[in-house]
Amino acid sequence: MPRIPQRKATKGSQRWLQILVNGHSDVFAREFLPKIKCSPDAKITWLSPLQEDEYAEYQDEAFLKRLGVQLSNHSLQDFWPKRGPVWDGLAVIKPTNVPILVEAKAHIPEMYSPASAAREPSLTQIRESLALTKKAFGSTADYDWSGPLYQYTNRLAHLYLLSELNHVSAYLVFLCFVNAADMDGPSSVAEWEGALRLVRTILGLREGKLSRSVVHLFIDVKELGAGCP
């Protein structure tokens, strides 16, 4: 159940997320809260990556514990093997404590990842859980969810575990940084949106109940200044 301490990052999405969370969390709240149409008194409390927590990132049961989430109907162990996603960021919406799972990107190639390297019996467990998730997102067996977009799909799977299998209201945020020149990242939201349309096409994603809990957020790093706290 790992908690994974990190260094103060010097570049990329890890750097910009650390800066956002520890010095400019208001920017995230300003962009995110209107998208989910929550109550006016809603606030966001960040749980990682926090400077006072060694910028730690969380994986497996540790991410659930950090969020204060208990899975009463379907356990993480029964759904996904160990060494699952390491979450870039974790937060909750106060006062309801609705979890927010964050995956951050600073450039488009970061959207793509190697296929799952799991071996049996873990590979079968992953494929079965991805198949269930695909159905919930309106995709079909014709689409490959274990290939180069595997990092994206396994995040969707964990949202499915929380929201559908355990009835825990939650949001999955794909946070796309604009003007991350340190990574030669997109200089406009339109570039990100084009890449994300391609992702949805490749995965056969359809609009539906669960897709409304997936938020693609675009934040310009120019709003975050140059220094890490």
Image: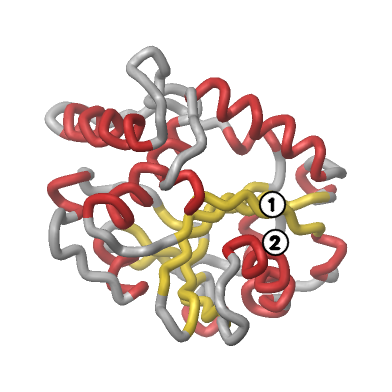
Q: Is residue 4 visible?
A: yes
Query: Which residue is identified by label 2?
Result: 16
Q: Which residue type does callout 1 highlight?
A: Gly
Which percent across, then down, holds residue 155? 42, 45
Which percent across, then down, holds residue 138? 40, 30
Crowding at mark 2 (Cα within 10 Å: few <14, some 14-19, many 20+): many
Crowding at mark 1 (Cα within 10 Å: few <14, some 14-19, many 20+): many
Contact between labelled residues 1 and 2, with CB atoms less than 8 Å apart: yes
Which part of the image, by quadrant, shows the C terminus? bottom right
Residue visible at 30% across and 66% down in the picture: 64
Name above or below for residue 218 compared with residue 23: above
Q: Secondary structure at mark 1?
A: helix
Residue visible at 71% across and 78% down in the picture: 26
Query: Which residue is identified by label 1?
Result: 12
Residue 10 vs residue 42: left or right? right
Q: Secondary structure at mark 2?
A: helix
Q: For residue 115, what is the image quadrant?
A: top left
Q: For residue 170, what is the image quadrant?
A: bottom left
Residue visible at 58% across and 63% down in the picture: 36
